[in-house]
Amino acid sequence: MVPAFSRPRPAGPQVAAPDAARARPRAEPSAKRGAGVRTALVTGASSGIGAAVARRLGAEGGWRLVLSGRDPDRLRRVAEDTSATAYAADLTLPGVDRQLTDFTLASVGSVDLLVAGAGVGWAGEFRDMPPHAIEEVFETDVLATLRLVRLLLPGMVAAGTGRVVLVGSLAGCVAVRDEAVYSAAKAALGTFADALRYELLGTGVGVTHVVPGVVDTPFFERRGTPYRRSRPRPVPAERVAEAVRTATLRGRDEVYVPGWLRVPCRVRGAAPGLYRRLAARFG
């Protein structure tokens, strides 16, 4: 768990560490929200796609943001750029999902948008993957997200409005060599998005599954293996952030970044045998 390095301030960017007592919701926090102002919680916001989404929403205006991430220094900088409230924490630790939820409700009131951008990867042959790495990938990419959605969803349904954006990966659609566990985790997230969307029909709450390919972020550096494939080429995190914003405004269920990535996904779905032969040959 990341320790506190500042106490929440009355106004401006804030960074707080997990503290259940300090995060207890105030009475009727939504009453302080201005007309037309929406609220969003973005996880994984200390870098990469999450940080880009936070900056895109902050630049648009009309959003009250709570940002969550593991790296307190990076998170502080993103919060300063976006006039957001930040909560530095590791969402895989027991009880942190509840603390973040309480802190968010206390800070901005009901949540209109959840962007689940937290994620980690691991590359290499599965037989060489340490057990703790398997657990970390699933805890971060799947279980932490599901727990947070479970806590925020009842409020959205009660309000009759809201959107959950789940940041997946092309790896979850087509499976990627030497990324077996990461592919499985992102596939689970995509299936969860579909099932939850069916469940929420008629509630006013939508679910968006964002499927980026290779994104130019510190992700590959942190997993310990650089990206070496010639294709697909990395796209800027800002492009994914713009796709998140557009999908949110238009209520889209699924979006690929770049758009042509839906082709291999469709080929794999329609002709899995052909896809596997092509993947085995071209990688």
Image: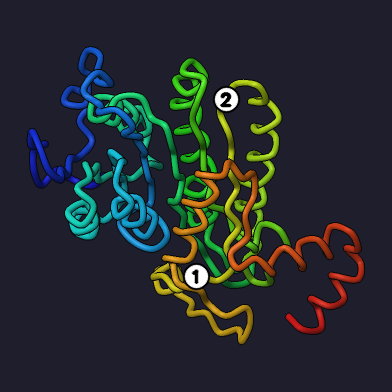
Q: Amino acid at mark 2?
A: Gly
Look at the numbered disc 2 and give the secondary structure of its residue.
Answer: loop
Quadrant in which the N terminus is drawn: top left
Q: Position of residue 227 (x, y in %)?
A: 52, 79
Vertically, is 17 above or below 154? below
Q: Point out which mark residue 255 bears.
A: none
Q: Point out which mark residue 215 bears.
A: 1
Vertically, is 7 above or below 261? above
Look at the numbered disc 1 and give the secondary structure of its residue.
Answer: strand
Quadrant in which the C terminus is drawn: bottom right
Q: For the point 38% across and 52% down, which residue is it?
A: 44
Image check: 115 left or right of 131?
Answer: left
Vertically, is 165 above or below 148? below
- Give residue 189's quadrant in the image: top right
Q: Amino acid at mark 1?
A: Val
Q: For the point 61% across and 53% down, which residue is it?
A: 186
Judging by the rendered image, the residue that carries numbered circle 2 is: 204
Q: Position of residue 17 (x, y in %)?
A: 19, 40
- Give residue 55's quadrant in the image: bottom left
Q: Position of residue 72 (x, y in %)?
A: 21, 53
Q: Residues within 10 Å of mark 2 (few under 14, many from 20)?
A: some
Image check: 43 left or right of 15?
Answer: right
Q: Position of residue 168 (x, y in %)?
A: 57, 54
**32 and 233: which is toward the camera:** 32
- Give residue 280's quadrant in the image: bottom right
Name, please, the residue furthest toward the top.
27
Q: For the point 91% across and 67% down, which residue is it?
A: 273
Image check: 26 left or right of 101?
Answer: left
CB-based contact (under 8 Å), mark 2 and mark 1: no
**65 and 245: which is toward the camera:** 245
**48 and 108: which is toward the camera:** 108
